[in-house]
Amino acid sequence: MKRNAIVLMVSLSLILFSQVLFAAGQADQAQKGDAGEVTEIVYWQYFYETKSKLMDKLIEMFEAEHPDIRVVQQTFPYEQYNTKVASSVPSGTGPNVINLYYGWLPTYIDSGYLQPLPTSQFPNEKIEQEFFPLVRAAKFDGSYYALPTAVRSLALFWNKDLFKEAGLDPERPPRTVEELVDFAEMLTITDKNGNYLQTGLTLELRAQMHHWVREVLIRQMGGTPYSDDNRSVTYDSQAGYDAFTFFTDLHLKNKVGMPNFMTDDVTAFKSGAMAMTIDGSFRLGTLDGVQGLNYGVTELPSMNGISSSFASFWANGITSFTTGKELEASLKFLEFLTSDEVMSMWLDAIGELPAKQALALTDEFRNNPKYGPFIRSLEYAHATKFIDESVQRKVWIDAYDQVVLNNASIRDAVNEAAATEQKMLDSYYNSK
């Protein structure tokens, strides 16, 4: 009798255990979705701490909404990122969804690395109605190949404490380029040998200043950097010579700074050794994390009554070898990354601006003391339609070195830059 009771208890326990296993299996099945399995996709972006952390959070949100999809984020140092992407092109390997600077898109589209976004989910008309016009730089041969979560523009950052020490009103930044130079001279400090202890203004062409020369100074001098169809360089003109003379004079005559001061402009500004810098909205998250840094942001100073700025973006595209369920999952993830909710979170965490006009141009964002200058400048900013951004940046770095280090004339340096860039444009467009 006692033995029978024990057998009964064991049997009941086995039944109960099997029911628990069945319930667990059902729950796991529900989590995996109707297909009974989880589709995994890989997302690449370059490593930027605040972006990486936010993406981890966004992936958690997305996976909660789509339990049948798993997203794996992989990041690489910025300096190695383009090389890492390029090395994956020939083998058709790498991520499913990839974050690329818009100026790199032509290279990767021509290589067959990216696929056009399906108009069934991303209609051209809807994109062009909702997003800022600058996003059209991601449209080639009538198709969009990538879309941004956020866009960026340039603004002037100034150190309020250094302004006060120089006898300037810390709440009143320069409004014109003439004031910018006057303020920069007052804010520059050198030792008895002329070595910079504190610079008034960044002159780093490797960073954002090549955009300032191309899309701001040249236009403020009355010229344009390129023809309307983007096929021809047009800065080998008086406006281009005047703009580059002004820029090189900041170092040679006004002596308000130099390239590579304290390694780079971000380091110098963060440490309080640079009074003013021109940078993108993406820098807000970094600067806000610097304890004791008292800074302000304003729109770029005007010249000759002309206001101009440069706008850009990093865009998410889908690799050409992504098909089937991975493609379906990747498209859902891209829809998520271009949602209003994600754009708002990106602005709060990173400082980059919502890519959709209706969201970015709300009074809340336009009037924000730090976001506002960037958002307002989007209305007159220009996004250079790069073909090879690295080459188009380097021509200005080389031109600067020719003038400052080799005593070349402004005209010769600018003409050489224009010729090099025109050759690159011809090679690209003549192959179309």
Image (cartoon, rainbow, N blue to C red):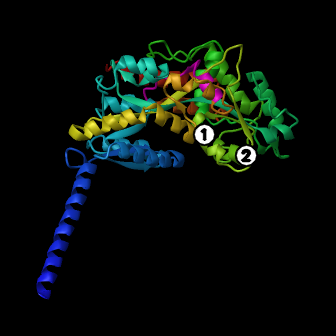
Is residue 285 rendered to the left or right of residue 296?
left
Please, is residue 407 above or below residue 63 in the view?
A: above
Is residue 327 rendered to the left or right of residue 266?
left
Q: Foreground residue, 107 or 128?
A: 128
Q: Foreground residue, 103 or 290?
A: 290
Separation of marks 1 and 2 at Cα, in angstroms: 13 Å
Residue at 59% over, 18% down: 380
Q: Where residue 347 sits: x, y (%)?
A: 55, 36
Q: Residues within 10 Å of mark 2 (few under 14, many from 20)?
A: some
Q: Foreground residue, 33 or 153?
A: 33
Q: Where residue 429 sits: x, y (%)?
A: 37, 19
Q: Which residue position holds label 1?
A: 283
Q: In the picture, which quadrant includes the N terminus?
A: bottom left
Residue at 52% over, 22% down: 358
Residue at 47% over, 15% down: 232
- Is 282 magenta? The answer is no
Q: Which residues are magenta?
A: 372-388
Q: In the picture, which quadrant includes the C terminus?
A: top left
Q: Where residue 189 sits: x, y (%)?
A: 82, 42
Asked whether residue 47 appears in the rendered view, the answer is no
Q: Foreground residue, 198 or 27?
A: 27
Q: Earlier in the sequence, mark 1 or mark 2?
A: 1
Is residue 34 rendered to the left or right of residue 250?
left
- Dot 1 falls on a residue whose secondary structure is helix
**View extreme (front): residue:** 1
- Is 379 magenta? The answer is yes
